[in-house]
Image: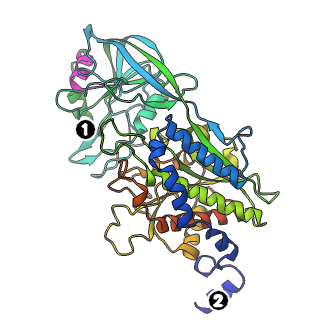
Amino acid sequence: MNKLLLTLASIGLVTGACAQQNKTAMKYAEIVSPELANKHLSIIASDAFEGRETGKPGADKAAHYIADEFKSLGLQPIVNGSYFFDVPVVQNSFKVNSFTVNGTVLEMGKDFTARGGAGTKNIDAKDVVFIGYGIGADNYDDLKGVDIAGKVVIYISTGEPTSDGKSKITGTEKVSDWSTPRSRKRLDLIQSKKPLLILAVTTTAPAGGPRPGGQGGGGRALPMMLKHEGENPAVVITIPMATADMILKNSGKTIADLKAAIDQVGAPQSQTVKADVVASYATEEIPVKAVDVLGFLPGSDAKLKDEVLVISAHYDHIGLMPEGSKDMVNNGADDDGSGTTAIMELARAFSKAKKDGHGPRRSILFLGNVGEEKGLLGSEYYTDHPVIPLANTIADLNIDMIGRIGVDYIGKPDSANNVYVIGSSMLSNDLHKVGENANNLYTHLDLDYKYDDPADPNRFYYRSDHYNFAKHGVPIIFYFNGVHADYHRPGDEVSKINFPMLAKRAQLVFYTAWDLANADKRPVVDGKK
């Protein structure tokens, strides 16, 4: 270290590598241990919990196990005296009763599919609005100047405008986030304009048209969603190109013609087309028992205790395999038994610190989310109806799969000393620095930022509960070990968990949380992503 650094360190201006370890924090971090992790995980990921599927007895068992642990630690039940926060999840039995285009009766499973929806409605429209790819980018906007409120709309739901192998939106061979796998960006935009019905044209349908089923029948489980508040969004019906051509017949163009024109000139071809569209659909809602589990540790500083740090993980998994399977239970030991175990360990560590007079200055909410596997339902409902105002929430540290080695690290040296860190600087550079400093001082893990990108084709940033905090402007860090061969399979067993690695990753979360909960100032929201 040079003289300037020595001088700066002497007056307390150097952080990171030059900062001093906090012996008190280190004492309580030791409570987060492989032994404690093994104890909890061996219970909640056992066959007795039947894969913890939302709405099933196994998930209810898990919720009560977590609540009992929070109670034993002295965490406060802040949901009207309860640890359980009811999440209004429903299963929708959705059915299209009839669908006719220009006098031709369409057949479900051949001419269209409808994977789900909400509400009951009869539609009788005399025209449809073609909105190209349904994209609203700065340099290409299918919806600019187009009013689709109360209209039937038809759009190309796959791909984006391209010419000579380059996207018209990005200007490169890389597609934009409007059309990456799992992206809902264009559908969310279209639904926000309040159309009457959405017809999504797929140009990549399997031979023979759409797959049969898709209305909650055919042996498939009914889809789960939050009970909708207010007006239902427009139902989406998926159609192949042949059905689209039937609808667009009066325009004199096929869907392939319109697509080619967009791609050739790089400009929208949005237009209204005369077409008789008559449809009728209905929905039956079946309530599903679902609860988030909340344990609250109040802060010790009178000026800071109203500010809250959230530490979250989802306790649900995907449940049981079909009857007759060799292994019936998807135990979800890593996904996300490992994260659920971690938040219980962290709760024990912080609770013990508080009992010993070293409690955090800010409050901490330990949040076990339900319905993550059904579409981030528990965290979505919590962030839309927060028990503690989101304006008072300084950050969310979300833990989802930290007990195994991901496929990228198998066979590599030091393969058990890493963790993927996602989203730490998306909204706050301060938060990113706190996480880095905690690791540099204490855990010395290899922090891998490979997936720390909203444009990551895996879309991991969007795929766990932290995202619902982020979309409300709350800074987040997502801790993740990457996928493995047993992801969402019965092989995700306790026997395959690396407990020392799980504990070390959880200790990184502890040290990060310790610094956040005790800092003089909360992380500034200044990220540009």
Look at label 1 and name its amino acid: Asp
Q: Position of residue 454 (x, y in %)?
A: 44, 52
Q: Can residue 157 be seen here?
A: yes
| Quarter location, residue 281 | top left
Number of the front mark, 1 or 2:
2
Q: Can residue 520 be seen here?
A: no
| Highlighted range, magenta | 237-249
Q: Residue at x 39, y 44 (%)?
A: 329
Helix, strand or loop status at disc 2:
helix
Please state if 163 lies on the left or on the right of 488 as rendered. Answer: left
Task: State the residue position of label 2.
Answer: 6
Would you place residue 211 above or below residue 463 in this image?
above
Q: Is 6 one of the magenta-colored residues?
A: no
- In the image, farthest residue toward the bottom: 3
Would you place residue 107 above or below residue 33 in this image?
above
Q: CA separation, marks 1 and 2?
A: 61 Å
In which quadrant of the rendered image does the N terminus lie?
bottom right
Looking at the image, do the residues carrying marks 1 and 2 touch, with CB atoms under 8 Å apart?
A: no
Dot 1 or dot 2: first in sequence order is 2
Report the disc number at residue 263: 1
Q: Residues within 10 Å of mark 1 (few under 14, many from 20)?
A: some
Q: Position of residue 471 (x, y in %)?
A: 55, 45
Magenta stretch: dominant secondary structure: helix
